[in-house]
Image (cartoon, rainbow, N blue to C red):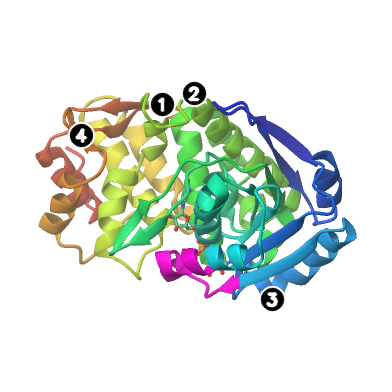
Amino acid sequence: MNRLQVKTPDKRDYEIVLDKGFNGLTAEIERLELKGRKALVVSDTIVAPLYLDKLTEVLNASDIKVENIILPAGEESKNQDNAMKIQNLLIDGNYKRTDIMIALGGGVIGDISGYVSSVYHRGLIFIQIPTTLLSMVDSSVGGKNGVDYNGIKNVLGTFYNPALVYMNLEVLQTLDERQFFNGFAEAMKSAIIKDAIYYEWQIENMYEICDKDLDTLEELVLRSITIKKNVVEKDFYDTKGERALLNLGHTVGHAIESEKMGVLLHGECVALGTVAAAYISYKKQMLSLEEYLEIRDMFVPFNLPITVDTIDLDNVIGKIAKDKKQDNLGLAFVLLKKIGKAVVDRTVTKDEIMASLKELEYTDDYE
Ligand SMILES: NC(=O)c1ccc[n+]([C@@H]2O[C@H](COP(=O)([O-])OP(=O)(O)OC[C@H]3O[C@@H](n4cnc5c(N)ncnc54)[C@H](O)[C@@H]3O)[C@@H](O)[C@H]2O)c1
């Protein structure tokens, strides 16, 4: 078992616990003095049949009365209607601020549950139990939550920290391959941004990672969330530029993601976006050709794409221009000075972005 403490601006610091199994939750409930409370578990139609019974058993053993709501699996569930369904259950069940909401699932369940937790009676006790690699290494840490509305992703949301993030690494064994590597893209992104030694470690442990070796996964998740924790502790509200570094690969990635909705997953688009950012960094003589090619090619053994076909380049450029990372100072593009050192750059031109998109179509010509 490993644990990390996350410091928050409102001094409601919380722990992230990495465990193998659900039984360790009992001690955490005791530590947080939550015995005897009521809990609403939010889960989805894939995760609930796998893990809800075991979780309920562990909570019941701590004298916690458990109710649940199970949403259809997938991004489409992250909406206002479902947020209201959760709210209504809380109201009908007369939940108090001292009661608990538990998110058992991936980032979709974590985001919608965190959102409702933050507004119900201005905040009830929230526990994240992330079950995808993406939600372990990224979305469960940092306090961002939200729902999609009118086709706009995460447009409604708040910053709200959980009281506990409890990760049972064993659940990653049931995650399908594509979802697993989708989450790995964010882990690799963190390493490329902040930690060259961790990046080397990922390459050295490539086979163990792909085999989902449990001890290797524990180290992977621990090292990734250590990076995320350090960033969000410096810039919780995403106003100081530090948290923006986490957006490496997201400017181009988001635009491709909305072009390829339903075809490519978020992490796959982040991999493509990171290749594009590394290419622009190379063209701006910040990275060497060798470093660019290394970053690009290292996604391949992890089943992540480095090329994409049939995208409308002008459409993608148009979407980037509308990106929320664009403010009155221009587009904040995350580039790389070297592996392990990302910077926010506001000088990236449309031509440079277009060249990087063409690079994603793959060519051998690097001149
Ligand atoms: N709040 C943040 O800071 C933040 C950061 C990144 C992403 N996100 C959000 O996270 C969401 C994506 O999260 P995700 O990739 O976890 O998607 P997800 O929650 O949709 O999970 C992916 C799929 O895996 C299934 N699944 C989950 N755990 C499983 C397990 N252990 N075994 C088998 N199947 C399992 C789910 O049912 C789902 O079908 C997006 O909505 C994104 O906006 C939020």
Where in the figure is residue 150, as x and y percent of width and height?
28, 64
Residue at coordinates 27% horizontally, 48% vertically from top-left? 252
Where in the figure is residue 352, as x and y percent of width and height?
15, 38
Image position of 74 with respect to 115: above or below: below
Q: Callout 3, which amino acid? A: Pro
Query: Do tag 2 and tag 3 residues touch (Cβ < 8 Å)?
Result: no
Which numbered mark, 4 or 1, is in the foreground of this view? 4
- Looking at the image, residue 209 sits to the left or right of residue 334; the answer is right
Q: Callout 2, which amino acid? A: Lys
- Mark 1 vs mark 3, CA separation in Å: 39 Å
| Residue 327, numbered circle | 4
Query: Which of the pair 201/258 is nearer the observer?
Result: 258
Query: Would you call the spot at circle 2 few (<14 residues within 10 Å), some (14-19), or many (20 or more)?
Result: some
Asked whether residue 286 is drawn in magenta, I would say: no
Helix, strand or loop at label 2? It is helix
The residue under label 2 is 234
The residue under label 3 is 49
Image position of 306 with respect to 228: above or below: below
In the image, the segment drawn in magenta is: 70-85
The residue under label 1 is 242
- Mark 3 vs mark 4, CA separation in Å: 44 Å
Q: Earlier in the sequence, mark 4 or mark 1?
A: 1
Query: Which of the pair 170/98 is nearer the observer?
Result: 98
Query: Would you call the spot at circle 4 few (<14 residues within 10 Å), some (14-19), or many (20 or more)?
Result: few
Image position of 196 with respect to 16: above or below: above
- Looking at the image, residue 242 sits to the left or right of residue 61; the answer is left
Where in the figure is residue 15, as x and y percent of width and height?
70, 36
- Mark 4 vs mark 1, CA separation in Å: 16 Å
Query: Which of the pair 307/319 is nearer the observer?
Result: 319
Query: Do tag 3 and tag 4 residues touch (Cβ < 8 Å)?
Result: no
Query: Do tag 1 and tag 2 residues touch (Cβ < 8 Å)?
Result: yes
